[in-house]
Image (cartoon, grey):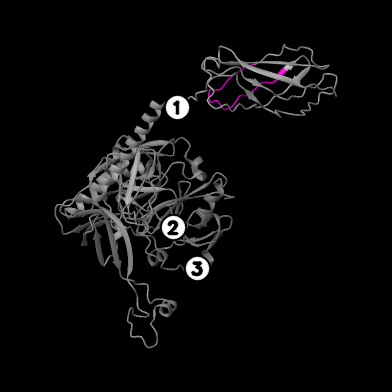
Amino acid sequence: MSESRWIVTARTSSLGEMEMRAGGSGPSAVAQNNIKSTTPIRKTNRLLNTRICRVGPDIIRAVSTTVIGAGLNCEPTFEQAGIGRIQLNVACSVVSKFQPMRLSILALCVALSTSFAAQPEVVPMPTVPAAVAEAGKDVVHQLNNAFAKVFETVAPSVVIIEVSKKNDIGESSPLDDLFFQGAPDDNNQRRNPGGPRPIQSEGSGFIVRPDGYIFTNFHVVEGADKIDVKLRDGRNFSGRVVGTDEKTDIAVVKIDAKDLPVVQLGDSDAVRVGQFAFAIGAPFKLDYTFTYGVVSGKGRSKLLQTGAYSISDYLQTDASINPGNSGGPLCDIDGKVIGMNTLINGMNRGLGFAIPVNMAKEIGTELIAGHKIMRPWLGIRIETLGDDPTIRDLFKGADKGVVVRTIEADAPASKSDLRPFDVITHVDGTPIDSDSQLQHEVLKKKIGQSVQLSVWRKGQTIKVPIKTGELPNEIAQASNALPIQPAPPTQESVGKFGLQVQELTKDVAERLHLPVQQGVVVTDVEDNSIAAAQDIQREDVITEVDGKPVTNVKSFREALTKADPKRGVLLYLDRKGSKTFAVLKAGD
C-alpha cells in the first residue's frame, strides 16, 4: 500500500472562507499545490470542519478539525482582526488508486497545531456585546420582580385552613396504644388508649370580601367539626361554613373580621393557554408556598365525578399543586385570581387543575346570599360521538354530536320523544360537538325553559323539544334488590352473548316493580361475557332489538337470528324506568 504524508495549510479569504492547499511527495501526489476546498469559518470560534479533498483517484480525509483559538474573529478576515495566517498541520492518509478501494484511514487528525503571525497583542472579542448582555439582565430582573410582586400582592389575601373532623372509623390500632402509653407508674393521660382520635387536615383559601368571606374547596371543609383560619399576618380566627356546592367542589367560609385584604378576581374566560400561572397555598403543611408555570389547557372535563353528574370546566396548569394547595388561588402575572386550585385524586403528578374563577364567583356569590344552588336538567346520560369506537359504524351519516346513552326515569327527557341511541347535534341552533359542550349549553338555560334539540335518528334529522327540570341532589340508581326466581320452563339462554332471559309476565313485572309490561327480562349475565362487557344487568328488560319490538322470548330469539352480530346487535333496555341501550358484537 502506497502512502504519503501531507501538510494541509488553511488560510482565510476576504469572504471569511477557508482555503486549503496541500503539498507533499509520493507516488500518489499527482496534483501537488492543486488541492483546494472552501469551507465557511464558524463565528463561534470553536469548530472548523474540513471537507473531503480529492486529488484525482486519491482521497484525503480530514474529519472535524478543531480550532480552539481564544478570541478568533472572522469578520471579515483574520488579518483585519489582528491575527495572522493560520496554519493547520494535519496528518492524513492518502490511499493510492492502485490499491483496493478499501479506505484505510491510518490517522485522522492525529496532530493539530495552530500558529499565529507575530502580533503585539490579541484582544479577545466578547461573544455577546456588553450592551446586549446588560439589556438581557435587565429583562430577567424585570421578570424576576414581576414574579415576586405577584406573591407580595396576593399572599396577604391567602389563608391557611386547618380542619378537625371526628374519626368515625373506630378504635385506634393496638400498636398505637403500645407506642403512646406511659410507663407503668406514670399517670400520663396524654391520650385515651383505644379511643378514636380526630382527623386533622389542611387546605387553603382566599379572601374575597373585607368582612371575612373566603372561597375554598368543598372537600377541604367537608364534615368539619372545627375550622381554624390562619392569615398571612399571623392572626388566627375560628371559621364557619356559610354554604357549599359539592358538584363544583366550591365552599364559602366566614370569619369574624373587618378590613381584611382581598384578592382581585380576574376573568377566566379570557385566560390563554401558554400564559404564566402562579399558585399559592400550603402543600404538605408548608404554608405560603409559591409555585409557577403556565396554563396548559382549558375546558378539561370528566376529572371529578360527583355521583352520576359532574360540573367541570377545569383550567390545567403545570404549576405544582399538591395536597394543601386545594382551595388556594391560581393567579396571572397581574396578580388577579383566574382559578381555584383543586387536587384531583390520583392526578397530581405534574398535572395541576383549577376551577375557573368565573364559576367560583358565580357559585360563591349565590352561597353568600344564602341561595340554594339550582341547575337545569334534561335527565340524560351522554357520550361524545366516536368515544366508543365499537359502535361508531352504527352511526353512519352522523358526523358530530353526542349519543344519548340513557334517559333517566321520571326525568324531563323521559316525557319527550327523545330515545336512547339518538345523536343530539344542536341545542337551540348551536352545534354540539362534545358531551361537555351540551352540558354547558343546558346550564345556560333556566329551569322550566323549553329547549329545541336537533336529533339524528337512523339517518333522519328530527326536532325534539324538551322542557328543562331542576337537577336533583341525588339521581336514583338502578337497584337489583329484588332477586328474580324465574320459572325454568320459560328460561332461555343466549349462549354466545352470555345472558339468560325469560318472559316478562304481569306477575314478574309487579314483583319487580317494573313500569313496562312488554319484553323479556334478563335473569342472569355470565361473568366476562359480551353482555357483561356492555353492562347489561339482571332485571334489565329488553324491549327492542335493532328497532323491532320484543313481545316474548320467541320474538327476541327471532330478532337475534336476523341481526348481524359482527356489525352489532342493538338492544333497547328498560332499567327500573330508565331507558338505555347496549350493542352486542360477536367476538368482543
Name the residue carrying label 3: 487
In front here: 311 or 507? 311
For badge 3, the amino acid type reads Ala
Circle on res. 128? 1
Q: Residue at x 33, y 63 (%)?
A: 201
Residue 471 visible in image? yes
Q: Quadrant of the N terminus?
A: top right
Numbered disc 1: secondary structure: loop
Spatial CA distance of label 2 from label 1 is 78 Å
Residue visible at 55% across and 49% down in the picture? 585
- Check the image and report above or below for 480 versus 80: below
Q: Is residue 417 above or below residue 477?
A: above
Task: Kindly identify the amino acid type of the residue bearing the numbered disc 2.
Answer: Val
Disc 2 to disc 3: CB gap under 8 Å: no
Question: What span is in magenta?
Answer: 38-53
Badge nearest the viewer, 3 or 1: 1
Marks 3 and 1, how far apart in space? 91 Å
The answer to whether residue 447 is seen in the rendering is no
What secondary structure is the stretch in magenta mostly built from? loop
Quadrant in the rendering for residue 264: top left
* Among the 4 quarters of the image, the one containing residue 149: top left
Q: N-terminal of the two: label 2 or label 3?
A: 3
Would you say 440 lies left or right of 57 here?
Answer: left
